[in-house]
Image (spheres, helix red, strand yellow):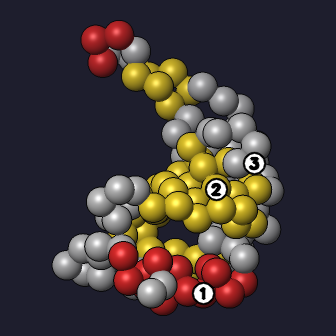
Amino acid sequence: MSFLDQLKFNSDGLIPAIIQEQSTGRVLMLAWMNRVSIEKMIEVGKTVFWSRSRQKYWIKGETSGHVQLVKDIAFDCDGDTLLIQVEQTGAACHEGYHSCFFRSVGKGGETITITEPQLVKPDEVYGKKT
């Protein structure tokens, strides 16, 4: 039995995937996957996601060069969330930050602090603001 048979996909056939940098433990991003994208990820050794907005598959870094090499794939006790540990090259965030979680909310929710430097401007990577 494949581990894929133990996963619980939502009604759209998707499962959330938490992407974590293996060397630091830092959470880089959350994205969505389906069975085909998981199979493709295992085949190519890079993260492959399903874009809900564009309705298509995408390999992280195919445009930017900021790839994620898969080091470990785990799933939670309920089988409804993946944890994928990666070796990240460059920015994981499409806004040019190492992690998509680059903002912290201050006490009382009144302030937002940028917690890491922007590694690259999005228009330098994608040719336009995203």
- The reply to whether callout 3 and callout 1 are in contact (CB within 8 Å) is no
Q: Which sits earlier in the primary sequence, circle 3 or circle 2?
A: 2
Q: Position of residue 50 (x, y in %)?
A: 46, 78
Q: Position of residue 110 (x, y in %)?
A: 32, 15
Q: Residue at x 76, y 43 (%)?
A: 23
Quadrant of image for the C terminus? bottom right
- Residue 115 seen by the camera: yes
Structural crowding at the residue carrying mark 3, measured as other residues with C-alpha within 10 Å and reported as few (<14), some (14–19) or many (≥20): some
Q: Given the image, on which type of amino acid does mark 2 rest?
A: Gln
Q: Residue at x 34, y 65 (%)?
A: 79
Q: Rounded to the nearest whole Å, what is the CA distance between mark 3 and mark 2? A: 23 Å
Q: Rounded to the nearest whole Å, what is the CA distance between mark 3 and mark 1? A: 28 Å
Q: Which sits earlier in the primary sequence, circle 3 or circle 1?
A: 1
**Residue at which label 2 appears:** 85
In this rendering, the answer to whether 100 lies above or below 104 is below
**Quadrant of res 71:** bottom right
